[in-house]
Image: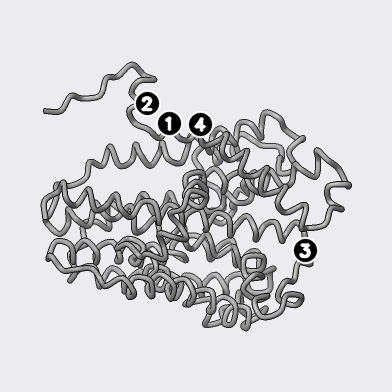
Amino acid sequence: MDQATQLSEDRQYIASLTGLRGVAAMLVFIYHYSALNPGIRLDLTVPVIGSILQFPFGLGGSGVDVFFVLSGFLLTLPFARSALGAADKPSLSRYFKRRFLRVFPAYYAQLFLVLLVGAWFVTWRPQTAGTFIAHLAMFFNIGPNPVPPVVGVWWTLPVEMGFYLILPILALFMRPSRWVLVVFAGLVLSIVYRNWCAVHFIGLSPEHVVQAAVQLPGTLPEFLFGASAAILVQYLSIKGRASPSGWKLDAMFVVGLLLPALWMWHVVVGAGASFWQGHLTMLVTPIVLGLTLSLSVMGLYWGSRLGVVLLANRVVYYLGLVSYSLYLWHFPVMQQLQVIFGPAYGDLPNWIKFPLSAAAVVAVSSLSYFLVERPFYRLKTWRQLFGKKPKQTA
């Protein structure tokens, strides 16, 4: 298969996987909506499907795990194809430039707006020179004296940045025989590290354990399994192997999402308060989520018809496009709605307040995406801003 054909095929997965990003962002939004509006129990009030409807309110934070697996998969694709001898090595300067332009402009815009407006934002707190520099470098929630991020959901950003930094190193070991050892070492490291977190912070609040355990290498298995899926699909493509049949792809998509949900709902919740105290489920949850979610991602990559219907439609695809800005802004927007409209807004029933909150979050996220995120991420636009003309190709 020539490179042009491969690029054409790679474009086919974008819509569904972009839609999956949108679903992940909305899961996190719903989870935090529930945190700000406690007491929503659809599992107790809605017959038959109540537990399904309740999942995003209770465990929607697992949308972050979807982000980690998707990052491992999408970022690894070109590195895997190169490591398998089917393409040139990706340009590291271009790779890091695109990662910077993907993450920092929208983040900086939000950071400076929050600091500029100051105490009007519920999430604002005074900054010292040191904490300000930590925010500029996106170096918070790390180390023995972590800097609390101005916006709580930013805790995932240093984790993502860690993935971006280690991927070029991991790419040196992407031959199948070497990669198995890399994955095994990463899984062991994750288990040991998460156990250390539970032991080290014993007696403190669960938040201390959570804050440490979700950092690298605690979430490394999710990235590694996403990367492993990318290596597998590229290997099979290079070898000319046909992708699974349609019903198998749909099964991969559904099972790859259903199993993590069942694990979170029955196993993690079943562990109760002991989960963050070194319980076995705490140690292996990133492995379970990474492995199963990767199965779903591969199904989408290969063209699951059900995935196209559910995730590549205009609404979900659009949510995927603005998913990063939606993730950045959803929590502050919900907080500020209470500031703007006062107690009357807080007293609204959820069937009115939830769609209003969702509409406000999507509106602000859209502004962030179109005014900041997209213009900077497009390299052609970036070159034009600085007066650089794109190179001419033959």
Q: Residue 86: x and y, percent?
A: 12, 54
The tag on residue 372 is 4
Quadrant hosting residue 220: bottom left
Quadrant hosting residue 207: bottom right
Measured Cα–Cα span from mark 1 to mark 2: 7 Å
Q: Residue 240: x and y, percent?
A: 13, 65
Measured Cα–Cα span from mark 4 to mark 2: 12 Å
Q: How many marks?
A: 4
Q: Quadrant of the C terminus?
A: top left
Measured Cα–Cα span from mark 2 to mark 3: 44 Å
The residue tagged 2 is 381
Q: Amino acid at mark 4?
A: Val
Label located before the other in sequence (4 or 3):
3
The residue tagged 3 is 38
Label located before the other in sequence (3 or 1):
3
Q: Which SS class for mark 1?
A: helix
Q: Residue 203: x and y, percent?
A: 68, 74
Residue 189 in sight from this viewpoint: no
- Residue 290 sits above or below residue 153 on the image: below
The residue tagged 1 is 376
Q: Foreground: 120 or 144?
A: 120
Q: Amino acid at mark 2?
A: Thr
